[in-house]
């Protein structure tokens, strides 16, 4: 019988991990102790720098006889370097590509933006990871090159009843892909479309030793277990049964907030219901603070979010922009006890189109750990948005904002959606 995702259950050991500098060592350690199976889903799998260390750990596991299954998104992940294709194929890694595009022109087709955006991993049905971190080096971006500071993102290492739920979700999607998309699960080397043989920019082969990375890979910070007996639930978003589960969880938690709402989100373009929930919380005396993207990454996401600021600022919401590097986090803490960490942005691409996965946690220790880190980021690296300066922003910015909103609406219309 299928398990009910979304139900809070006790008995979880949770550890908060920040960035690939903490996530990759924990992930590779788990892969190197795997005995039976590994399931991995990611939007981006990039083999540059420390990303190659994860690929090498998958290879080692498969060579030991572990069943290794990897699912990557056909838009988010660039074609894999030929050398890695051959290595993983020889090792016996099973690899599938979710909705391979073939051509970027297919993005204009209805349904083509329904991407796999989940970041999940399960090892031996005993340990899981869920969050927003891709298999992508913290200091590398496929489009922008070397970053000035590590990308900001979070993940949770999970032990407890939820591991079975996460495994079941991954197993079901793996089995459904052949029926939905008309191809059969095959070994890694047979899963690639013709012409997908060019490697991505960056080193290919064995992972680069830390001593050869000019000190760019700091020693991982080992955080203590953030919760030893936490209540937690898995929230999935898809285009069938679970279309609004993540958004509904946010709305319920914000609606019940009495003291504080703290959100860090990479691509923030909430629809009317979420905007009103945040504004009403601020108006009834709840301290609402947002940590949002302050560095230009993508035209549509960057500029389309700016007009949303106006009503939020009028309601008393504090908005801080993070600019040392790219903000990629999708996390929240409410009243110091409710928290969520996952892959879902608060924008229409995540809330209407993509497959997403978030953990919701009700635990004061876990929520407190995440809250302290977010407050530190706001205090030290968040630039507060002044309502007066925002109102006087240049006309050129306003034009770009309106243009981005038009582009967003047109893109959603092509996909048969309306959000704003």
Image (cartoon, rainbow, N blue to C red):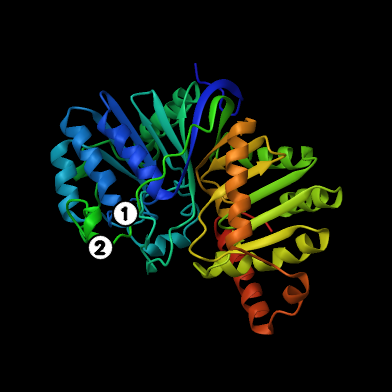
**Residue at the extreme top:** 1
Which quarter of the figure has residue 35?
Answer: top left
How crowded is the residue under tag 1: few (<14 C-alpha within 10 Å), some, or many (20+)?
A: many
Q: Does residue 396 sit above or below 238 in this rendering?
A: below
The secondary element bearing badge 1 is classed as loop
> Of residues 32 and 197, which is closer to you in this image?
32
Q: Which residue is disc 2 drawn over?
A: 202
Residue 136 is left or right of residue 413, and the answer is left
How crowded is the residue under tag 2: few (<14 C-alpha within 10 Å), some, or many (20+)?
A: few
The residue located at (40%, 38%) in the rendering is 180
Residue 197 is left or right of residue 325, and the answer is left
Sequence-earlier tag: 1 or 2? 1
Q: Return the x and y of residue 360 as percentages of the image width and height.
A: 59, 34
* Quadrant housing the C terminus: bottom right
Which label sits on residue 116? none
The secondary element bearing badge 2 is classed as loop
Q: Does residue 42 sit above or below 198 in this rendering?
A: above
Residues marked 1 and 2 touching at CB (< 8 Å) = yes
The residue located at (53%, 68%) in the rendering is 295
The residue located at (60%, 50%) in the rendering is 374
Q: Which residue is disc 1 drawn over?
A: 46
Q: Return the x and y of residue 184 as percentages of the image width and height.
A: 28, 36
> Of residues 371 and 182, which is closer to you in this image?
371
The answer for how far apart the CA atoms under marks 1 and 2 are is 9 Å
Q: Is residue 322 visible?
A: yes
> Of residues 47 and 81, which is closer to you in this image?
47
């Amino acid at each position: 019988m299928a398990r009910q995702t979304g139900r809070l259950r006790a008995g979880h050991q949770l550890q908060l991990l920040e960035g690939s500098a903490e996530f990759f060592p924990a992930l590779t350690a788990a892969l190197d102790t795997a005995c039976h199976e590994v399931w991995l889903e990611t939007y981006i799998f990039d083999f540059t720098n420390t990303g190659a260390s994860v690929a090498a750990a998958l290879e080692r596991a498969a060579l030991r006889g572990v069943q290794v299954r990897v699912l990557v998104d056909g838009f988010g992940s660039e074609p894999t370097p030929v050398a890695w294709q051959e290595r993983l194929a020889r090792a016996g890694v099973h690899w599938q590509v979710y909705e391979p595009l073939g051509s970027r022109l297919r993005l204009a087709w209805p349904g083509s933006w329904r991407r796999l955006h989940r970041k999940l991993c399960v090892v031996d049905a005993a340990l899981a990871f869920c969050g927003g971190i891709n298999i992508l080096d913290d200091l590398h971006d496929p489009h922008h090159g070397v970053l000035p500071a590590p990308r900001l993102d979070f993940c949770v290492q999970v032990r407890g009843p939820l591991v079975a739920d996460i495994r079941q979700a991954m197993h079901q999607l793996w089995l459904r892909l052949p029926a939905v998309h008309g191809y059969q699960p095959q070994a890694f080397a047979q899963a690639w479309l013709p012409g997908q043989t060019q490697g991505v920019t960056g080193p290919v082969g064995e992972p680069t030793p830390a001593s050869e990375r000019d000190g760019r890979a700091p020693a991982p910070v080992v955080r203590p277990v953030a919760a030893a007996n936490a209540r937690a639930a898995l929230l999935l978003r898809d285009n069938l049964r679970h279309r609004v589960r993540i958004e509904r969880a946010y709305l319920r938690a914000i609606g019940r907030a009495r003291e504080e709402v703290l959100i860090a989100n990479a691509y923030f373009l909430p629809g009317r219901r979420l905007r009103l929930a945040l504004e009403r919380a601020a108006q009834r005396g709840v301290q609402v603070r947002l940590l949002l993207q302050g560095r230009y990454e993508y035209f549509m996401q960057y500029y389309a979010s700016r007009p949303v600021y106006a009503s939020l600022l009028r309601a008393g919401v504090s908005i801080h922009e993070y600019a040392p590097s790219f903000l990629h986090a999708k996390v929240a803490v409410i009243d110091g006890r409710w928290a969520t960490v996952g892959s879902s942005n608060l924008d229409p691409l995540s809330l209407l189109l993509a497959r997403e996965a978030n953990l919701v946690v009700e635990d004061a220790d876990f929520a407190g750990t995440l809250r302290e880190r977010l407050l530190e980021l706001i205090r030290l690296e968040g630039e507060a948005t002044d309502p007066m300066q925002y109102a006087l922003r240049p006309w050129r910015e306003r034009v770009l904002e309106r243009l981005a909103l038009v582009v967003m609406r047109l893109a959603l219309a092509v996909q048969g959606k309306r959000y704003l």
